[in-house]
Amino acid sequence: MLPQFEPVVPGHCLILPLQARAATRATDSGVWEEIRNFKKCLLKMFAQQDKDVVFLETVVGLAKQRRHCMIECIPVPCEVSHKAPMYLKKAIDEAEEEWSQHEAKKLIPTSGDLRQVIPENFAYFHVEFGLDRGFVHVIDDESKFSTGFGLDVIRGVLLLPAQGMDRCPRRVPMDDQKRAVAGFVKDWGPVDWTKQLD
């Protein structure tokens, strides 16, 4: 789906599984494969626009089950996508002193299957650059971790103003949402893997 609030960039979209889970780490194998298929298709779609996709997932509130699994998909120009891992690693390193209660490993590399890297009931921030490289950061203290952290770093990479904790996200007017959906559907149609299911 497209975000109800102002997107980071045009094409910013969300993958939200129908299965009621708080994290992709907790989904079953079938849902995991469907998420991966959507990611593959988004990469293909945005490659036609000379863009890569950064996938972000922030998992907090597992004990209270207050959040639904959501993966932010942000298209970024190819010429800046190679900078995104460096910026995100640097931002986590700088913020680690505020977040962490002990010297845990800050970043754990991932290559495709997050389920093999982190236990099921841990709060985490996961970022993927394509399908086979990324990293996960275990969140020690959820009260100190901003759920908008990843999006703000991507805004910085793209030289856009940060959302900031003091600003409420701006809702997109309905007419603008309809135009955005129509444009997205036009680009998505040729790569939509679900058409093969009919």
Image: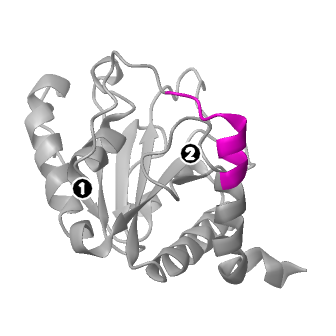
- Identify the amino acid type marked 2: Met
Residue 182 percent across, percent down from the top left = 72, 60
Residue 49 percent across, percent down from the top left = 46, 78
Highlighted magenta segment, given as a residue range: 170-179
| Residue 20, picture quadrant | top right
- Name the side, left or right, on which 93 lies relative to 165: left
10 Å crowding of disc 1: few (<14), some (14-19), many (20+): some
Q: Alpha-carbon distance for marks 2 and 1?
A: 20 Å
- What residue is pinned by disc 1? 108
- Identify the amino acid type marked 1: Ile
User: For numbered disc 1, what is the local secondary structure?
Assistant: strand
Residue at the (37%, 51%) spot, across then down: 126
Residue at the (33%, 43%) spot, across then down: 150
**Cβ–Cβ under 8 Å for marks 2 and 1:** no
User: 159 above or below 82?
Assistant: above
Any mark on residue 134, and which? none
- What residue is pinned by disc 2? 70
| Residue 5, picture quadrant | top right
Residue sitting nearer the eye, 176 or 58: 176
10 Å crowding of disc 2: few (<14), some (14-19), many (20+): some
User: 78 above or below 71?
Assistant: below
